[in-house]
Image (tube, grey):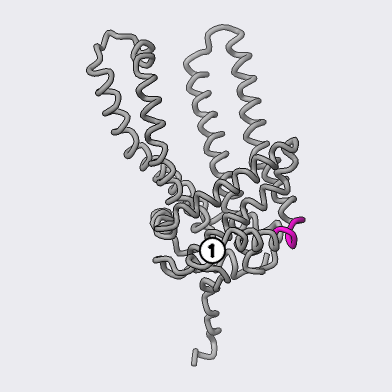
Amino acid sequence: MPPPDEAPLEPRPTEPAFPLTRDDFTLSDLLSRASEAWSRDLGPWVLAMLLYWVVGLGIPMVLGGMWGFFGALQGAEGDPSTTFELLDWFVEGVVQIFQLVLSAIFTLGMWAMALRGLHGEQVRVGVLFSQMAKIWKYIAQAIVVALGFVLIVAPILLIVFLAFIGPVDRSTPMQEIMESAGQPLGIAFLLLTPLYIYIIAGIAFIQTELAYNDDAGPVDAIIHSWRIARGKRWRIIGVGVVAMFIWVGSAMLCGIGLLFGGPFVVLLVASLYLALREGADVPPANTSTTLGRNY
């Protein structure tokens, strides 16, 4: 019994069961789950997509356009000063960081909306801003993934470059070097496509894991995603192709179709994530933020 002056601690919400498991689901099952949540919560989803377009995409675009226009005016008056060039780099950097922060808010927020809806929880637009405390995790995982790709791909491209071009004279113009290396590097990129697909399928659920599991840090999310995808990459690729067709088909409707098709794609991929997580070699998720609160 706790002391009289202390309230008992509420049990921490843990990962609830999902009806589908990694070894027992079909594409039809995923489409059915996504369709059910989509039709029930379509109103909040459309509002969330509108907010993303206006705030997540619109504001950085306007800021970048305004500063670009100001820079063009400076250039029209003659060569810009060194001070202006430094200020230009600084402003562009600030805009990029601002855009990355907005991307973190909306990306994790939409995954949270999808995960709540698929578990039958009430979905409101407020859920979109439920992941603010995880912005640093989103940015950190993006940096780790980018560095990982560079460390994997750069040595391969360097080997191809040296094999086809050989040592380069320092006096050779860079444009001439790149023209000589263009074709072999292009072939190398094509040959590396299976490796790209293999890696992307393995890290497809990093952001979803961050939104779902409060205990997952940036590196944890990468490891968990890799384990969730283990042995199921063909199924991930197959669902990814279906999602891509839905996305492209929605975008072809003057872009307005994405208001409706975009949420369905998110729900479809989130359904796949939840199904594959059931039975995967990952610890139970702490779902306090995403499922344990009312928004």
| Residue at far bottom of view | 1
Residue at image coords 66%, 62%: 32
| Residue at far left of view | 167
Q: Give 129 or 226, whichever is nearer the viewer.
A: 226
Residue at image coords 36%, 25%: 185
Q: Give 236 or 260, whichever is nearer the viewer.
A: 236
> Within the image, what quadrant is residue 159 found in?
top left
| Residue at far right of view | 43
Q: Give 99 or 280, whichever is nearer the viewer.
A: 280
Residue 117 at x, y percent in the picture: 66, 63
- Location of the C terminus (image quadrant): bottom right
Residue at image coords 55%, 68%: 20
Q: Please, is residue 195 above or below residue 293 in the view?
A: above
Residue 172 at x, y percent in the picture: 30, 9
Residue 192 at x, y percent in the picture: 38, 36
Helix, strand or loop under label 1: helix
Question: As shown in the figure, which amino acid type bears the numbered disc 1?
Answer: Leu
Tell me if I can see residue 209 in this picture.
yes
For the record, the magenta segment spans: 38-43
Q: Please, is residue 71 above or below residue 265 in the view?
A: above
Q: Could you classify mark 1 by the number of other residues whose Cα lies within 10 Å: few (under 14), some (14-19), or many (20 or more)?
A: many
Q: Main secondary structure of the magenta part?
A: helix
Q: Please, is residue 140 above or below residue 153 in the view?
A: below
Tell me if I can see residue 217 in this picture.
no
Residue 290 at x, y percent in the picture: 58, 64
Picture mark count: 1
- Residue that carries the numbered disc 1 in the rendered image: 274
Q: Is residue 211 magenta?
A: no
